[in-house]
Image (cartoon, helix red, strand yellow):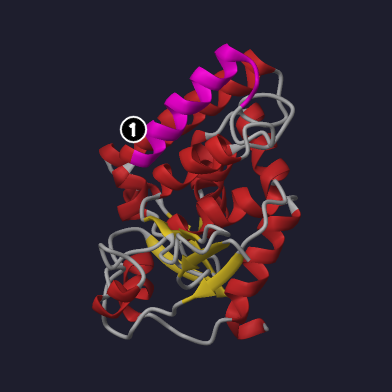
Amino acid sequence: MAYHLHITNKNYSSWSLRPWLLMKQLSLPFEERLHPLAPGSGYRQPQWKEFSPICHVPCLHYHLPTPEHSEPIVLWESLAIVEFLHEQYPDKGVYPRDLAARAWARSAVAEMHAGFGTIRQEMGMNVSLRVQLADEAFNEGLVKDLKRVDELWEEGLSKFGGPFLAGNEFGAVDAFFAPVVLRFGSYLGARERYLGGKAEGYLEVINGLEGVKEWVAAGLREKERHEPHEVESLEGPGRVLVRDLRDEE
């Protein structure tokens, strides 16, 4: 297999999900290399240096099918991976064919890559948990991010006709916002407070994708409990654990 995609725990890793889901949904051939998080550590793991120059995932290795290229081409950032795949497969729909839709999708991908820090901090990815959020959980930064998500989704769905953010086909922009979709499922109360009708409908579209279902099912089967991420999901005011779906597997 020419492409090896290095990722980590599916229950926790939003950045791993993005290129994985894109490649799955667009039927781009790759071999998954899963590296579980070491206990008590963050996402940057020293032992990952052997395949990632920044000890971080996702990391894509492209092995050229020629003898003179013994070392793979290495891409160690999700945005770089997406752009590389668009170059390699220009007709696969990584980005839309329409110029305006493509420009919008690229901008939204870049915004997701660089922004929404409070959502990441206050609604850390944990597909197995259901956490009820009360009013006091929604600080100013989180409210701002959630409103921007609704605004951005509404804009894309209205401008390009849906059911995906940049038109009628799944692409990179949907892969980049898929972890946000899963967060709305994990943290109860955010969806009801801050999403309009079109954005709510978009949640159902993404949750219905076969790739998303496969990722979530695999995350629920993971036995590892990574303490920093378990704590992250529950610390702070106005949070009550309702369910842990791993206990029901």
Residue 51 location in percent, x, y? 36, 70
Quadrant placement of the N terminus: bottom right
Q: Quadrant of residue 191?
A: top right
Residue 214: x and y in percent read: 70, 65
Lateral position of residue 197 relative to residue 126, left or right: right
SS assignment for the magenta stretch, majority: helix
At a point 51% along the width and 64% down the height, the residue shown is 67
Vertical side of 141 occupied by 161: above or below: above
The answer to whether residue 105 is magenta is yes
Place residue 101 in its image quadrant: top right
At horizontal 50% and vertical 38% (from top left) the residue drawn is 193
Quadrant location, the C terminus:
bottom right
Q: Three-letter amino acid code at disc 1?
A: Lys
Q: Residue placed at 55% from the left, 28% from the top?
A: 153
Front residue of 217/142: it is 217
Res. 90 visible in picture: yes
- Percent across and percent down for residue 56 are 32, 64
Is 247 in front, or is 2? 2
Is residue 115 in view? no
- Above or below, comparing residue 226 to residue 240 in the picture: below
The residue that mark 1 highlights is 144
Is the residue marked by circle 1 packed among few (<14), some (14-19), or many (20+) residues within 10 Å?
some
Is residue 116 a member of the stretch shown in magenta?
Answer: no
Q: Which residues are magenta?
A: 96-113
**How many marks do you count on the picture?**
1
Query: What residue lies at 65% left-to-right and 27% top-to-bottom?
Result: 198
Residue closest to the eye, 45 or 28: 28
Of residue 68 and residue 26, the one placed in the foreground of this image is: 68
